Image: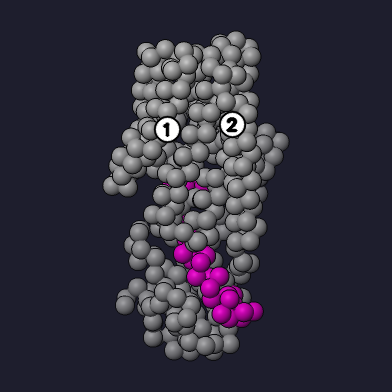
């Protein structure tokens, strides 16, 4: 495609690895670059060409290496498209990331080498805990969560279903898990993003889902082993006990599994900031408390909670998947790429 001298050209550029910036030009006076942040700041024009240069401020999927557009690009593009309805063209400048030839073969694809590389992937995803993580450690892990767990422990101890030593060991074990996943939550989320490609079934990559399922089954086995049989729960090392764990975990994952992907969709669409996303991650982990009802034998109430969560999580995921899709983008020809790159140099010089 090409653009005329009357078009308004919007450039989305990285000023650094953490800062995204936006500029506009009138194509006929391309020596004048104006930085802006909202669609309302743009002058009127017959057509707006939005050129999105690839970014390192945001990554998704298996990444760490950037993306063709940032969440802020998506939010701004929607805003511009709303103001200049039917007069907006989006151009991607990062080049196609399609393989162009041999796509994935077979209905199921499993990469066991990713399990062997898991320790290295975890090190690669290491993120230093920040003030927000420690704030949630104090208020959530050793605040709300601790109070809830103590209440759950007291009830069976008072009725004689759980002795005090087992209750203390279980409480310490729960708190240790919660502490690790709260403080190192950002590292763990990045790690899961990389594990997504470990398993593909049809068009769906479910490596992260599979990894979490096996992990949760293992931890829940240890939880119930320490607690012993409570309420509707049999001995955990019987076939019935292990089968109930598999069912409870799949219940929880199917109901709450889309919560994190829905939050990621919100961030990807530019609806929330990175900081807000991390708050949502921490808050979504409160749904893990629902598992206490299953661990302590309240199976019927656990079913009600997971059903309600299912409606919320899948509904949110559907909304941000269906109604926040990227608009069609045009392919710039060589002459246009060269011209836009020259405009980008002018913008960087300001």
What residue appears at the point 60 percent right and 37 percent down from the top-left corner? 306
Magenta extent: 61-89
* Residue 266 image offset from top left, x and y in percent: 52, 56
In front here: 184 or 305?
Answer: 305
Residue to which mark 2 is pinned: 302
In the displayed orientation, state which residue is furthest to the front. Answer: 159
Q: Secondary structure at mark 1?
A: helix
Badges 2 and 1: C-beta atoms under 8 Å apart?
no
User: Residue 29 appears at what percent x and percent y?
Assistant: 44, 89
Residue 148: mark: 1
Q: Quadrant of residue 45?
A: bottom right
Going by the image, does 140 lie left or right of 305? Answer: left
Where on the picture, by quarter, is residue 283? top left
Image quadrant where residue 36 sits: bottom left
Q: In the image, what residue occupies the spot 39% across and 70% down? A: 21
Q: Is residue 120 left or right of residue 299?
A: left
In the image, what residue occupies the spot 40% across and 18% down? 167
Are there few (<14), some (14-19), or many (20+) residues within 10 Å of tag 2?
A: some
Does label 2 or label 1 sit earlier along the sequence? 1
Q: Is residue 120 left or right of residue 316?
A: left
Q: Quadrant of the C terminus?
A: bottom left
Can the viewer see residue 22 in this picture? yes
Quarter of the figure with the N terminus: bottom right
Percent across and percent down for residue 262 are 55, 50
Residue density around tag 1, few if under 14, some if 14–19, many if 20 or more, within 10 Å: few
- Numbered label attached to residue 75: none
Position above or below: 106 against 318: above
**88 in the magenta segment:** yes
């Amino acid at each position: 495609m090409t653009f005329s001298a009357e078009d308004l050209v919007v450039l989305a550029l990285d000023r650094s690895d953490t800062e995204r910036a936006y500029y506009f030009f009138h194509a006929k006076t391309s020596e004048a670059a104006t930085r802006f942040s909202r669609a309302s700041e743009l002058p009127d024009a017959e057509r707006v060409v939005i050129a999105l240069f690839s970014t390192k401020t945001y990554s998704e999927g298996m990444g760490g290496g950037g993306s063709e557009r940032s969440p802020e690009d998506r939010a701004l593009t929607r805003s511009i498209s709303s103001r200049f309805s039917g007069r907006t063209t989006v151009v991607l400048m990062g080049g196609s990331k399609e393989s162009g030839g041999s796509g994935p073969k077979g209905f199921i694809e499993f990469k066991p080498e990713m399990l062997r590389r898991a320790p290295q992937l975890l090190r690669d995803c290491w993120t230093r805990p920040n003030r927000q993580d420690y704030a949630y450690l104090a208020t959530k892990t050793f605040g709300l969560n601790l109070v809830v767990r103590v209440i759950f422990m007291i009830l069976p101890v008072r009725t004689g279903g759980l002795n005090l030593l087992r209750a203390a060991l279980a409480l310490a074990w729960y708190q240790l898990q919660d502490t690790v996943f709260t403080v190192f939550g950002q590292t763990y989320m990045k790690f899961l993003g990389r594990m997504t490609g470990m398993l593909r079934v049809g068009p769906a990559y479910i490596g992260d889902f599979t990894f979490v399922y096996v992990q949760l089954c293992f931890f829940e086995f240890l939880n119930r082993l320490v607690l012993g049989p409570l309420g509707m729960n049999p001995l955990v090392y019987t076939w019935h006990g292990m089968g109930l764990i598999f069912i409870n975990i799949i219940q929880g994952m199917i109901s709450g599994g889309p919560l994190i992907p829905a939050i990621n969709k919100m961030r990807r669409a530019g609806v929330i900031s990175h900081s807000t996303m991390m708050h949502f991650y921490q808050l979504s982990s409160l749904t893990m408390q629902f598992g206490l009802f299953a661990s302590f034998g309240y199976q019927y109430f656990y079913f009600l909670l997971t059903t309600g969560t299912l409606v919320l999580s899948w509904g949110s995921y559907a909304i941000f998947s269906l109604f926040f899709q990227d608009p069609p983008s045009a392919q710039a020809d060589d002459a246009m790429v060269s011209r836009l790159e020259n405009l980008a140099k002018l913008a960087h010089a300001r």
